[in-house]
Image: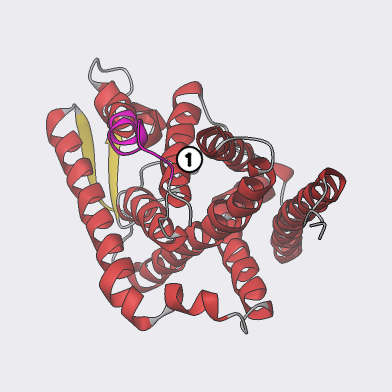
């Protein structure tokens, strides 16, 4: 009896092309969703200021002051919308179960926030810097506090949405595409590098990021990518990313991803001082050389030389 092959090279090639097309459409859909959200945001800002006959610079300032609020809520809604379309797939539920929230996600978020706060306080103590006190007056306390809470939720939503897009869906699809022609280790590296490039490119859109900030962002992408491809949950990555950005930007008003916002407390680092490489100076935590060294050490200690683990 003759045994027929289960799949031919041409069939595998067609499946690879189909998967690549689906991945491309998925990413284009996300980018278009974000673009439309920002278009709606700038339209609402312009319409709301029409009575005062604002100048273009005034409209731009108000819009970019709320840029990450729009970005975060748009990413979260994209995640929730797509999750709603696949709610019947039981594979999603263990990651979002109450047990996982209590046992993993909330502890990870709390540890990240505490670690970030400790890092800020240490850099405040070690480097020449200024602590300017609360970021709002008592007359505006309620509204300013509510504004900070909304922005904090937006940062968490952004982290959850983009980790799902890049370190869950896109990573898994690209891994399957590359596994058809590469070995396990080459597939792992190519997947993580490819997803990190796409993520950094997305995060650089409309952001004035310097070389140091881009380098740190790339290292963060590599760390989260290796963590996810070795079996880590994208929600844990979201808790780490969201907790850190929330602490730096909302709690201490430090610029993150090219965005400045007056949060609960105001800390200013002096970029002209010799020790600005510890704190990042005016560029914020993403310009910190110490943070970069820590990320490189963590990646090397956790992922170099280890055999890839398939999920």
Q: Residue furthest left?
A: 125
The residue shown at (48%, 48%) is 229
Q: State whether residue 93 is above or below residue 73.
A: below
Q: Is residue 189 left or right of residue 206?
A: left
Position of 185 with respect to 265 (left or right) is: right
**Measuring 53% from the left and 75% from the top, which residue is drawn there?**
91
Q: Which one is in front, 186 or 139?
A: 186
Q: Which residue is mark 1?
A: 221
Residues in magenta? 296-308
Residue 139 makes an appearance in the image: no
Q: Where is residue 268, by image quadrant?
A: top left
What residue is shown at x 19% (from left), y 34% (from top)? 123
Percent coordinates x, y for residue 122 in the rendering? 15, 38
Q: What colouring does the structure picture have? A: secondary structure
Within 10 Å of disc 1 (Cα), the crowding (few <14, some 14-19, many 20+) is: many
Q: Is residue 227 left or right of residue 57?
A: left
Tell me where residue 84 appears, x and y as whole percent.
Answer: 64, 80
Per the picture, the main secondary structure of the magenta-coloured stretch is helix
| Quadrant of the rendered image containing residue 279 | top left
- Which image quadrant: the N terminus? bottom right
In reply to whether residue 217 is colored magenta, the answer given is: no
Relative depth, front residue between 295 and 134: 295
Residue 67, horizontal then vertical, whole percent: 59, 52
Indicate whether 96 appears above or below 7. Answer: below
Residue 73 horizontal side relative to residue 22, left or right: left
Relative to 167, say whether 150 is above or below: below
Q: How many marks?
A: 1
Residue 297 drawn in magenta:
yes
Point 36% across, 82% down: residue: 98
Towards the viewer: 72 or 177: 177
Q: Nearer the viewer, residue 133 or 82?
A: 82
Quadrant housing residue 3: bottom right
């Amino acid at each position: 009896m003759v045994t027929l092959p289960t799949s031919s090279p041409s069939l595998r090639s067609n499946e690879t092309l189909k998967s690549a097309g689906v991945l491309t459409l998925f990413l284009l859909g996300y980018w278009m969703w974000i673009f439309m959200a920002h278009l709606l945001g700038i339209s609402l800002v312009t319409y709301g200021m029409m009575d005062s006959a604002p100048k273009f610079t005034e409209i731009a300032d108000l819009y970019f002051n709320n840029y990450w609020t729009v970005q975060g809520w748009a990413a979260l809604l994209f995640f929730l919308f797509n999750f709603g379309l696949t709610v019947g797939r039981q594979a999603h539920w263990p990651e979002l179960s109450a047990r996982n929230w209590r046992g993993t996600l909330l502890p990870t978020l709390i540890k990240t926030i505490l670690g970030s706060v400790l890092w800020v306080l240490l850099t405040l103590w070690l480097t020449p810097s200024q602590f300017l006190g609360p970021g709002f007056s008592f007359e505006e306390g309620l509204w300013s506090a509510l504004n900070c809470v909304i922005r904090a939720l937006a940062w968490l939503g952004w982290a959850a949405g983009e980790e799902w897009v890049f370190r869950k869906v896109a990573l898994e699809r690209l891994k399957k595409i590359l596994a058809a022609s590469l070995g396990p280790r080459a597939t792992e590296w190519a997947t993580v590098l490819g997803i990190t490039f796409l993520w950094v490119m997305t995060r650089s859109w409309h952001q004035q990021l310097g070389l140091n900030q881009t380098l740190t962002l790339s290292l963060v992408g590599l760390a989260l990518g290796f963590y996810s491809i070795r079996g880590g949950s994208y929600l844990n990555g979201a808790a780490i990313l969201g907790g850190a950005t929330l602490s730096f930007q909302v709690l201490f008003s430090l610029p993150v991803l090219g965005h400045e916002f007056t949060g609960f407390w105001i800390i200013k680092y002096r970029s002209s001082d010799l020790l600005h490489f510890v704190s990042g100076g005016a560029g914020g935590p993403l310009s910190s050389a110490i943070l970069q060294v820590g990320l490189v050490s963590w990646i090397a200690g956790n992922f170099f030389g280890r055999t890839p683990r398939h999920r």
